[in-house]
Image: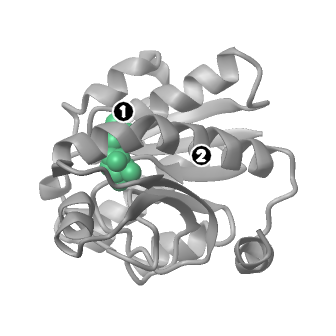
C-alpha cells in the first residue's frame, strides 16, 4: 500500500512508519511527505523527491492551500493518507476528497481532549489513565470514528512533558499497528466504531 504522510513538526510518528516499513512490520511505502511548514524537521526524514511543502500564508485562503495540498497528495497516488502531527485543520473539501482513507493520530483517549494541550488537560482533570487514538478524519476536529487506542497509567508527579514522553513510544506502536491493518486492506471506516466497541 502507498501511504501519504502529512506532517508539521519533528516527525517521530513518520519515523515510526519508516521504521515499521524497514523492519517488515508494515507492508507499505511512503508515497510522499507533505507539510504546511517548509522547515519541519520531519521532511528531512525522506528523500527530497518525496517532499512537498508550502507556506499557507502564500495562499489567498485556507481553501486555496488545501486544494494545492490535495492535488499534491493525490498525485502521489496514495491508498491511505496519514496525518502524523499535522497541526493545521483540514477543510471539508480535502476531507471529502480522501474520505475513507484519511487517518490521524491524536494524543488523547478520544473523545476526551480534542484539540491541543491534551496531556495538560488529562492531568488537570485528575485522570488515572491517558493515551493516544488513531481515528478517521472528518471535517469536525478530532471527531471521526476511532480505529484503535493505546492507554497508559498517569503516574504521581507526572507533568505534561513526562506524560507526553512516556506516551510517545506507545503512540508509535499504535500507529504502526493501525497502518499495518490499513495496508492489509482490512480496515474500513464503516467498521471503525464497531472495532473499538468490540475490543
Ligand atoms: C504527536 O503527539 C501527535 O499525536 C500529535 O503531535 C505530535 C507529533 O509528534 N498530533 P511527531 O511530529 O510525530 O514527532
Q: Is residue 153 above or below residue 176?
A: below
Q: Quadrant of the C terminus?
A: bottom right
Q: Residue furthest front?
A: 156
Whether residue 84 appears in this view of the structure is yes
Check contact, mark 1 vs mark 2: CB within 8 A.
no
Mark closer to the chain start, 1 or 2: 1
Q: What residue is shown at x 73% (from left), y 79% (from top)?
A: 197
Colouring method of the image: one colour
User: For mark 2, does the 10 Å Cα neighbourhood hold few (<14), some (14 to 19), or many (20 or more) residues?
Assistant: many
Q: Quadrant of the N terminus?
A: top right
Pinpoint residue 39: horizontal percent, then vertical percent. Answer: 19, 31
Q: Residue furthest left?
A: 57
Whether residue 78 appears in this view of the structure is no
Q: What element does badge 2 sit on? A: helix
Q: Viewer-proximal residue, 141 or 47?
A: 141
Q: What residue is shown at x 61% (from left), y 77% (from top)?
A: 145
Q: What element does badge 1 sit on? A: loop
In the rendered image, which residue does mark 2 sit on? 174
Q: What residue is shown at x 35% (from left), y 38% (from top)?
A: 166
In the rendered image, which residue does mark 1 sit on? 11
Pinpoint residue 88: horizontal percent, then vertical percent. Answer: 28, 61
Q: Is the shortest distance between ligand 1 and the CB of mark 1 under 8 Å?
A: yes
Q: CA distance from mark 1 to mark 2?
A: 15 Å
- Give ligand 1's quarter of the image: top left
Pinpoint residue 99: horizontal percent, then vertical percent. Answer: 63, 72
Amino acid at each position: 500500500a502507498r501511504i501519504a504522510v502529512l506532517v508539521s513538526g519533528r516527525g517521530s510518528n513518520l519515523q515510526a512508519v519508516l521504521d515499521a516499513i524497514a523492519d517488515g512490520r508494515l507492508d507499505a511505502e511512503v508515497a510522499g511527505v507533505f507539510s504546511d511548514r517548509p522547515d519541519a524537521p520531519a521532511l528531512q526524514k525522506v528523500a527530497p523527491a518525496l517532499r512537498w511543502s508550502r507556506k499557507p500564508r502564500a495562499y489567498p485562503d485556507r481553501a486555496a492551500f488545501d486544494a494545492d495540498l490535495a492535488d499534491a497528495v493525490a498525485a502521489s497516488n496514495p491508498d491511505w493518507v496519514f496525518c502524523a502531527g499535522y497541526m493545521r485543520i483540514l477543510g471539508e473539501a480535502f476531507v471529502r476528497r480522501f474520505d475513507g482513507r484519511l487517518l490521524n493520530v491524536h494524543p488523547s483517549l478520544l473523545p476526551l481532549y480534542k484539540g491541543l494541550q491534551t496531556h495538560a488537560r488529562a492531568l488537570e482533570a485528575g485522570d488515572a489513565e491517558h493515551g493516544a487514538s488513531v481515528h478517521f478524519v472528518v471535517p469536525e476536529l478530532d471527531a471521526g470514528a476511532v480505529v484503535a487506542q493505546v492507554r497508559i497509567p498517569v503516574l504521581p508527579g507526572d507533568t505534561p512533558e513526562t506524560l507526553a514522553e512516556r506516551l510517545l513510544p506507545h503512540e508509535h506502536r499504535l500507529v504502526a499497528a493501525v497502518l499495518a491493518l490499513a495496508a492489509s486492506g482490512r480496515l474500513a471506516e464503516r467498521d471503525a466504531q464497531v472495532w473499538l466497541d468490540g475490543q
